[in-house]
Image: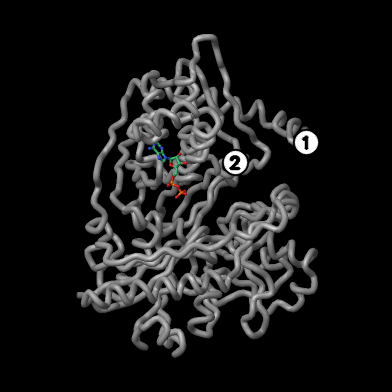
Amino acid sequence: MNYLIGVDIGTTSTKSIAFDLQGNILARRNIGYALISSEPSYSEQDPEEIFKAVVDSIRDVALETGRKGYDLSGIAFSSAMHSVIAVDKHGKPLTNSIIWADTRSRNYAADLKSSGLGHEIYMKTGTPIHPMSPLCKIAWMRDNLAEIYSKAYKFISIKEYVLYKLFGEYVIDYSIASATGLFDIYNLEWDRKALDFAGIDAIKLSRPVDTMHKMLGLRDDYREYMGIAADIPFIVGASDGCLANLGTNAIRPGEAAVTIGTSGAIRVISDKPLNDEEERIFSYILTEDRFVLGGPVNNGGIVLRWFRDNFGDMEALQGKESNEDPYDLLIDKAEKISAGSDGLIFLPYLLGERAPHWDANSKGVYFGINIKHSKAHFLRALLEGVIYGIYDVGRALVETTGDIHRIYATGGFVRSELWVQILADIFNKEVAIAESFESSCLGAAVLGMKSLNMIDSIDEVEKLVPVSKIFYPDGANHQMYSKLFKIYERLYGKLKDEFLNVEDL
Ligand code: ADP
């Protein structure tokens, strides 16, 4: 009985999960770590703390699964995108890991985005020009951390840091590379113009390798510590976003994965990289012939949490008495209102927005309030507004990649049937709920199975991810939403400049 470990180096924790070849979970371990924010715009993590979480979680899972009599075949990695660590000649970090949420390089991103060079770099690299990208962060370091910048031997991501410590070699998978803003996704090499903007040569970055690339020769001390045999291959794997598509079985052209947790995202698969003249979407690599195109939104489930925390006192109290989840009580209220919230429209940009506008200054708006609108209307409009935000990105994807046939939904929002139905109705598409709770870990394990020739194709993931329920769109609701979405879309265009005026008040 063989098994693989999928390791996902995430933003809040590292998850290691042991899967058998049918996709069943045999053991799991989750180890969290701190976020370091010494300035409001800084988001950093200690690479050593993360490394320890990786080796400890692998050790615990391997021990538990080994005791059950299973044999380990390989370990495959997923990790969050966009992190950067400057390291010296000996691999020692000169900085913390500067993660995706860090916005210190926002002026560099804004200047580059408004230039022709920015557009050229985006069209080559598939990474939206944004302070999240290592491209902008390294340029920032050059001017603001001059001493560290000049001492830096390499600029690497957290996954490269972990693999370097385990194997003594700097490699970066095409997937993580494709999210740096520095990688030419057409020719699979570092992009000269992007390197020039960051002020570095390719030698300062790792060697790009395929996402199914195997590493052997684990250092003895870590091999002993984790209790792993010397011949166990490590598969470099891909990014968490790309692997989430694989782990939910949304990997054929025309299939989309919609995730709404705290934030949200919609991603589709294409057999070639496709960029958008309007720079709304990303184009990241899963394997050499599958690209994940999509866009992240800041304003997912966090918007409902904001409503619950600020206007949900009654539901919190009631929930305490009846032992019900306040979210469910809020959703029950919204359910009583018909589709379209009687003309109340919500722009969900409480946290500014990434895709499709990439506009950090945008704000939330309730529009069209009349005397008949109640709290329940505000709730329903909020649920609809979050989905309009995702739909806005979905339309950009359809324009560039072709029609979407089916959506696989994951994340906390699937706990609400109403919310998922709104998704089906706004898109006018079938929505399947995939029974996959740790899709990035499972995606990594499936990539590992293919790399080790244990499966013929990653399409076999279909057998590992059962669908628990399908939601079908309602035509009448779709028509209503189509009318309202046109207003939603125009509202953003009309208010865009006004958002700037409330910024400094
Ligand atoms: P994370 O991004 O931290 O992994 P989750 O995937 O757990 O988050 O999603 C959390 C979000 O899911 C909450 O902010 C909330 O909007 C939504 N959510 C949680 N429970 C419910 C529920 N019962 N009904 C509707 N939405 C819910």
Residue neighbourhood size for the residue with mark 2, other residues' Cα within 10 Å, grouped as few (<14), some (14–19), many (≥20) = many
Q: Which mark is residue 504?
A: 1
Q: Is residue 191 left or right of residue 258?
A: right
- Residue at coordinates 30% horizontally, 66% vertically from top-left? 27
| Circle 1 SS class | loop
Q: Which mark is residue 353?
A: 2
Q: Earlier in the sequence, mark 2 or mark 1?
A: 2
Q: Is residue 364 left or right of residue 448?
A: right
Residue 19 in picture, x, y percent from top left: 28, 66
- Residue at coordinates 66% horizontally, 84% vertically from top-left? 89
Q: Identify the colour scheme used.
A: one colour
Residue 464 in picture, x, y percent from top left: 24, 58
| Circle 2 SS class | loop
Q: Nearer the viewer, mark 2 or mark 1?
A: 1
Residue 201: image quadrant is bottom right
Residue 488: image quadrant is top right
* Quadrant assignment for the N terminus: bottom left
Outermost residue, front side: 321
Look at the picture and state if 192 lies above or below 299: below
Look at the picture and state if 385 lies above or below 75: above
Residue 104: image quadrant is bottom right
Q: CA distance from mark 2 to mark 1?
A: 18 Å
- Mark 2 residue type: Glu
- Residue at coordinates 58% horizontally, 71% vertically from top-left? 47
Residue 132 in picture, x, y percent from top left: 62, 55
The picture quadrant for ligand 1 comes to: top left
Of residues 210 and 383, the one nearer the viewer is 383
- Residue at coordinates 28% horizontally, 63% vertically from top-left? 25
